[in-house]
Amino acid sequence: MSVLPSVSQRPPVSCGWFAKPWQAVLWRNWGLVPIDRLAKVLQTDEAQLREAAGQLGLDPDRQADPVWLARGYLTIIRQNWHLCTYEQICQLLAMREETLAFILKEDDFLWHKMGSFKPLLDPPVYQPLTWQELAYTRDMADWLNRLQPEKSWHQENAFAFVRHFTRLLSEEERSEAIRQVVPGNDLRTVYSYFALYGDPLMTPELDPFPDALLAEYARMGIKGVWLQGILYQLVRFPFAPELSEGHEVRIANLKKLIERARSFDIGVYLYLNEPRAMNDAFFQRYPQLRGTREGDFWAICTSHPEVRQVLEDAAYELFSQATGLAGFFTITMSENLTNCYSRAGDGYLCPRCAARKPWEVVAEVNNVLARGARRADPSARAVAWNWAWPESWQQKISPLMTENQIIQCTSETHLPTLIGGVPGTVVDYTMSLAGPGEHAKSFWQAAQKCGLETCAKVQFNNTWEMSAIPWLPVFDKVAEHVANLKGAGVRHLQLSWTLGGYPSPNLKLAGRLMDGIGDVHQFLSEWLGETLGDVADRAQQCFSRAFEQFPFHIGVLYVGPQNYGPMVPFQLEKTNQKASMLGFPYDDLDGWRAIYPREVFADQFEQLVKLWREGLALMQPHTGQSADFDDMLRLAEAALCHFASTANQIRFVMHRDAWLEHRDGSDRQAMLAIIDDERAMVLRLIELRREDSRIGYESSNHYYYTLQDLAEKLINLKYCADQLTYGTKTGSNE
């Protein structure tokens, strides 16, 4: 019996711009997956695949870069989700079903990102092309080569940025970084810019925090780094020891990381989301521990004394073995099924927890973990993040937190919004609006009354508003947020979730402002010099004002197309698919827009783009004078490509829907004009991405797109234009 989730009856989304489905498999995996695996998946030989690659305009001699299998497997899974069967995806990655099942379950909600369904499809296999299909393929390749004669999309440089951070530090560099360390005991923690989320301590060769990265963080004023920890993988799990295989290796690697980070005055923290839910087979052995159910999993009920003891002992063992581990933070609701109340009140489904208050159960989990950690190391810090705790808990839960925890709140939670005349409220993170909101301030005040320290969870580099760019040059928004936090009496900061960990000017500015040093203009002048600093300041003011136009809503963040930007294909027919969380935007405009009417949603992105362009216009005449200035400009322009493409996609779907209903020629002409503008965005992003391998990357999603994906979008645009102009795949729209 397969351990993978069941296959749905829902069909896949077609990519009709290829003559055959197997061509799409070849295109998306060429240079990422070794050719022998592709040949096995497509049931052909390597010679035929190289010939087919040449027909498509790909480099037939290109070899696969092994870095994709190590650091980009999520991209490969996503790219093949609507093309290949489970078996074929496992073959592409040389992966066991059990490993793919673990990734789907534990690698930061991947199953949800895939839409919580696997399409039903026939496995694509190689078939010879008919002469019509071959003619279409060659015409497509010739057109693409004329459009990009220098073949920029062949020059993939994915993960090139990793080399900068994994280089060996000279003694001079190490000493300089240590010399710049700012004394202090305030928490300022960050997640690695390129850590693998699922099981990073089992792959030391893919070090999430190499010394060169730690040195950069030290220069930014960072005092802590964090990574995910799963207790049954770190210490022996008495209920199911087989799940703990390799825990000694993980602990050994964790101890090495702790020692290396300590040399830069940086502590190591773990994110604990415990206890992890288990399947029915587990509870056949331990029926007395069964708690609330969600899908194929049940909570291990923390109201059972034996479970609480196992949790406390696990934390004790972890901190006893990983000597010097600085601490941990918890999320006790929403993220995964853990305690019986972790899913918004479903604890009543558990006979033990039904008789208890949810805040009592949640406080108890935090206390048990903190007690175990401090029994091993009294200096260990325990941070309880109130993620998804209801507002009504403000006065109830802090008095129950008996282990001197630090209470952490997402700063912007419940911040009221009024964008485009539409009222709303912030859930999740935002940079376009500066927190904190009253929700966080009330929680902090309640905690402070109980003698507990407080911490703000913030994003100062990027958010799901735009995560494909490592940092957004909106310094005024960072400064406004820092000033508000200081006014609320908050000392500690968690500076990123899985996104937002790049060692950037934004983080350095935030640290300086928290320490009361200077302002934005002074920072930019010191960083870039007086003249370029002044230009950068005026430009970032435009970017900051532009970003305020972002139509914020958690639905927009999670399912809107802005993070994938110009790689999202245009669809001439409705896919009837619902956009998934940071996975597939499809053409789901009514999902993207959340609370905003279609016209308001489109207008907000168009206003954002207009104001953002004004900032770029200020910077562009000054290129070539400073590498740092040019870097800021490049990232700002890449962000514009994403925002402008999002505006194009919104308008395209609006005109497409009207055209499908009325077949009005004006809608057809509007779609053709949007295709022309979108083509320019894609071409420019190809150039920017070729120059800068950071663009399009985010650690928990890997690459949103490859250069070949962007080239595929050009093919998709030609296909759409040909259909609109000639009613066929063939023809030209040059």
Image (cartoon, rainbow, N blue to C red):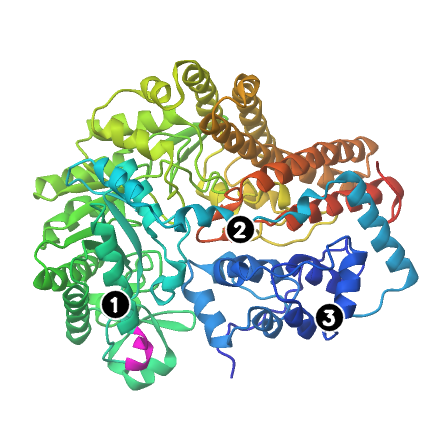
Residue at image mark 3: 46
What label does residue 150 carry, if any? none
Left or right: residue 663 versus residue 617 is right
Tag 1 secondary structure: helix
**Mark 3 and mark 2: span between their CA atoms?**
27 Å
Q: Percent from the top left, x then y, of residue 281? A: 37, 82
Instruction: Nearest to the eye among marks 1 and 2: give it.
Output: 1
Answer with mark 1 or mark 2, whichever residue precedes in sequence.
1
Front in this rendered view, residue 331 or 531: 531
Front in this rendered view, residue 192 or 407: 192
Range shown magenta: 241-246
Quadrant containing the C terminus is top right
* Residue 389 appears in the figure: no
Q: Residues within 10 Å of mark 1 (few under 14, many from 20)?
A: many
Instruction: Nearest to the eye among marks 3 and 2: give it.
Output: 3
**Mark 1 and mark 3: span between their CA atoms?**
42 Å
Q: The residue under label 2 is which amino acid type? A: Tyr
Q: Percent from the top left, x then y, of residue 558? A: 48, 47
What label does residue 703 carry, if any? 2
Image quarter of residue 309: bottom left
Image quarter of residue 321: bottom left
Tag 3 secondary structure: helix
Q: Residues within 10 Å of mark 2 (few under 14, many from 20)?
A: many
Q: The residue under label 3 is which amino acid type? A: Glu
Q: Which residue is drawn at 58% across and 66% down?
A: 118
Residue at image mark 1: 251
Answer with mark 3 or mark 2, whichever residue precedes in sequence.
3
